[in-house]
Structures are given as C-alpha cells and as structure tokens.
Amino acid sequence: MILIDGKKVAAEMKEEIAAKVKELKERGEKTPHLAAVLVGHDGGSETYVAYKIKDCEAVGYKSSLIRYEDDVTEEELLAKVQELNEDDDIDGFIVQLPLPAHISEQKVIEAIDPKKDVDGFHPENVGRMVIGLPSFVSATPFGIVELLKRYNIETSGKNCVIVGRSNIVGRPLSVLMSQKAINATVTVAHSRTKNLEELCKSADILVAAIGVPEFVKGNMVKEGAVVIDVGTTRVKSDQTKSGWKLKGDVLFDEVAPKCSFITPVPGGVGPMTRVSLLHNTLLAASGEIYG
Ligand SMILES: Nc1nc2c(c(=O)[nH]1)N[C@@H](CN(C=O)c1ccc(C(=O)N[C@@H](CCC(=O)O)C(=O)O)cc1)CN2
C-alpha cells in the first residue's frame, strides 16, 4: 500500500508556483492578488481561510481578507462581491463556504465575475469545464486529479466510483474523471443509490466525498483499489488540546491494508485543495483562461 502524500505534492506545486511568481516580478509584471471573503466564525472556515492567506504569502502573492459577522445581509455581501469584481488590483477572489442560512450561496456565486472566480463555482466556469473549454476548475477536484497524475496512477478504462454529488467535489470530479485526458468510467453514488456496498466494491478508484466520518468500511473496498478520502469532519475528542480531531470519510485502519494507494486525512486531499486555489489565482492573473 502506498500512502499518497498530499502535503508533499502540494509543497512541490507551491515551489513551482513561487518560481513563476518570481519570474513575473523580475519582468516587472503585476503581483498576483487573491482576496478571500469570510463570513462568521465557523472553526473550519476560519482555519481554511487563514491557510489560504498564509499560502499566498508563501508563494509571493498579495492577499486581502474581508471579514463579516454572521448577521451580514445578503445585499451587503453582494455589494462587496460587486466591489471586488470592479477592483482592478484583485485578480481573483473566493467567498468561503458555507454561508449562513439567510444568504443564498447560489446568488453570491452567480454574482462573482467568472474571470475572477478562482473557486470555479460560477455556472459559466462549470459549463465551460463540462464541455472541455478553458475554465477555472474547482480546487478539490483539480487537486485530486493532480494527485493521481503525479503518482502515475492508471486511470484509463478504470471504474471510478464517486460517493457524493456536491457541486464542489462530486459532480465536477465526475466530469474531470470522464474527460479524454483521464478516460475513467465514472459512477456517482448518493444517498438513494442501491447496493452501495457492492458498487463501491466494483471500484478501481473509489472517491469518498460525502462528509460522513468513516462511512467507507473495509468490506466496501476491492483488493488493490485506489482510495481517495475527501472528508474532513471535526469530531469531538478528549485526546486533543483543541477538543476535536479530524476524521475522513474512510475508516482508514480497515481500508488501507486493502488498497494499492490511499490518501490520509489530514495530509491528503486538503493540502491539494489549497494549492489548487493558488494555481487558479496564477491563471487569473495571467489571463490564461479568458484572455
Ligand atoms: N469557497 C470555498 N469554500 C469551501 C471550499 C472551497 O474550495 N472553496 N472547500 C471546502 C473547504 N476547504 C477549502 O476552503 C478546505 C478543506 C480542507 C483543507 C485542508 O487543508 N485540510 C487539511 C487539514 C486542515 C485542518 O487542520 O483542519 C488536511 O486535510 O490535511 C483546506 C481547505 C469547503 N468550503
């Protein structure tokens, strides 16, 4: 079994990005600038946004953090999105999800200028990705594909089962995995899928992206499968100082011995999500997607 080291691959990609930023600066070109909008004080969101800002510093980008309390109105947030759309110094921006229930995530996503949508969530980017046009691809699916490529994992003709159909991970990943460059045969499973255990067991590549800790058990995995764990749920723990620990969607101790490759949590897909945002920001700054 090979443990896929997302932290190491992300560090390599960060070095590649930092080298490109250095070149840009030496040529006197503009420094890429990412802005992040964070609403409220959700523990996970606070952590992820703090990481995103730190990552920008590490590769030489400019970054801006815009914070709102939980009671910000949808109108206020939409006005900020408009301001960021019009700010020529900002190449790309994200609005950290989830948002409080009184704000429509879809409305906010659709208000973002697709040219600055480095999360790749806007329908224009999703549509372009589906038909194979240049687009911003959402960070987690892009990161997963990059991990498979950098570990030389064979995907052509393989059965890929993705458990979870979220707009952020499952759906876009299903499109990427079936594209000609990857050539996998893809099935998306969800809460109404029948014979889920059997279906998962047919997978050469199994992606768990349902947000249910330790959902995938040993009896659901084929001998020699590649298992990608997207889950990062904080569960209560009296063994840690913080009072919680991270759990993936895969029961690692049961599943790992059966796998050819597996991603750990933490240190697997999470760091790849972060570096993929840096990748998209560089694309936004260089105008490579929309010219
Ligand atoms: N606007 C967005 N919101 C959300 C996205 C997104 O891509 N854009 N994805 C997720 C959360 N996410 C990114 O924001 C994210 C998740 C996990 C990690 C990560 O580095 N995980 C580490 C552990 C982190 C920890 O110590 O808690 C790991 O798995 O090793 C980064 C980003 C939802 N919202």
Image (cartoon, rainbow, N blue to C red):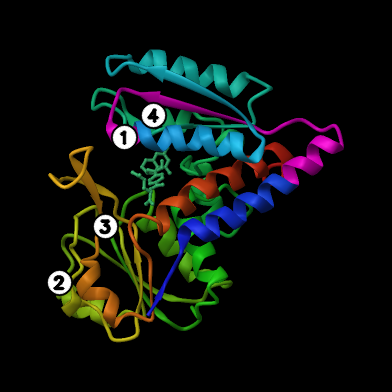
On screen, residue 234 versus residue 154, left or right, reads left
Mark 2 or mark 1, earlier in chain? 1
Q: Which residues are magenta?
A: 20-45
User: For the point 25% across and 68% down, which residue is it?
Assistant: 252
**Quadrant housing the N terminus:** bottom left
Q: CA distance from mark 4 to mark 3?
A: 30 Å
User: For the point 52% across and 35% down, which residue is it?
Assistant: 54
Mark 1 or mark 4, earlier in chain? 1
Q: Amino acid at mark 2?
A: Lys
Mark 3 or mark 1, earlier in chain? 1
Residue at numbered disc 3: 248
Residue at numbered disc 1: 98
Which quarter holds ligand 1? top left
Horizontal and vertical percent position of residue 271: 46, 51
Q: CA distance from mark 2 to mark 1?
A: 29 Å
Mark 1: C-beta under 8 Å from nearest atom of ligand 1: yes
Q: CA distance from mark 4 to mark 2?
A: 33 Å
Q: CA distance from mark 2 to mark 3?
A: 23 Å
On screen, residue 132 versus residue 161, left or right, reads right
Residue at numbered disc 4: 107
Callout 1 secondary element: loop
Identify whether 71 is placed above or below 124. above
Q: Amino acid at mark 1?
A: Pro
